[in-house]
């Protein structure tokens, strides 16, 4: 009877250890996915702000038909989810890039790039980049 109980205890410990490892992997996967979605949502918000700037008159601190002069507000340039930068600015187009802050198992971070025009926001694919 003692060997059977010992075998059950060992088996229970092994099953519990496997369950803990699976739970940790699922949680890490959830964190990475959540970070990717947050980066996309925040960069789309910045694209909307850029379009708003484009249509505002200069008197209301806008671009009056130009993206030149648009800058990312300080509180939105570096958030808990990512870092956002302007990669190029032209009169009729601006390109924004966002890089996430949570690395995957290969130490790569989520990155997305969007191109904004006066009436369109085009998102590029979400890719993984090395730091």
Image (spheres, rainbow, N blue to C red):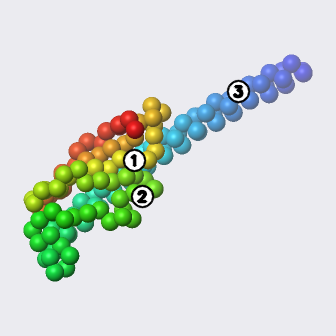
Q: Position of residue 87 (x, y in %)?
A: 23, 50
- Chain-order first, disc 1 or disc 2: 2
Q: Label 3 crowding class (10 Å Cα cut-off): few <14, some 14-19, many 20+?
A: few
Residue at 84 percent of width and 23 percent of height: 6
**Residue at mark 1 to residue at mark 3: CA–CA distance:** 36 Å
Seen from the viewer's position, the closer of residues 129 and 36 is 129
> Does the residue at mark 1 contact the one at mark 3 (Cβ under 8 Å)?
no
Q: Which mark is residue 125?
A: none
Mark nearest the camera among 3 and 2 is 2
Question: Is 50 located above or below residue 20 in the figure?
Answer: below
Q: Which residue is mark 3?
A: 14
Seen from the viewer's position, the closer of residues 74 and 122 is 74
Q: Helix, strand, or loop for circle 1?
A: strand
Q: Position of residue 103 (x, y in %)?
A: 45, 40
Q: Which residue is mark 1?
A: 100
Q: Which residue is mark 2?
A: 79
Residue at 14 percent of width and 76 percent of height: 58
In the image, 118: left or right of 85?
left
Mark nearest the camera among 1 and 3 is 1
**Residue at mark 1 to residue at mark 2: CA–CA distance:** 9 Å
Question: Is 44 located above or below residue 2 in the figure?
Answer: below
- Chain-order first, disc 3 or disc 2: 3
> Does the residue at mark 3 contact the one at mark 2 (Cβ under 8 Å)?
no
């Amino acid at each position: 009877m003692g060997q059977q109980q010992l075998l059950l205890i060992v088996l229970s410990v092994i099953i519990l250890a496997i369950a803990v490892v699976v739970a940790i992997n699922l949680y890490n996967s959830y964190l990475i996915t959540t970070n990717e979605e947050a980066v996309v949502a925040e960069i789309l918000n910045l694209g909307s702000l850029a379009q708003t700037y484009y249509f505002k008159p200069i008197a209301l601190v806008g671009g009056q038909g130009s993206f030149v002069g648009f800058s990312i507000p300080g509180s939105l340039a570096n958030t808990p989810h990512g870092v956002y930068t302007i990669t190029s600015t032209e009169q009729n187009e601006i390109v924004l890039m966002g890089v996430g802050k949570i690395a995957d198992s290969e130490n790569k971070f989520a990155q997305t790039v969007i191109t904004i025009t006066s009436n369109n926001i085009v998102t590029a694919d979400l890719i993984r980049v090395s730091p």
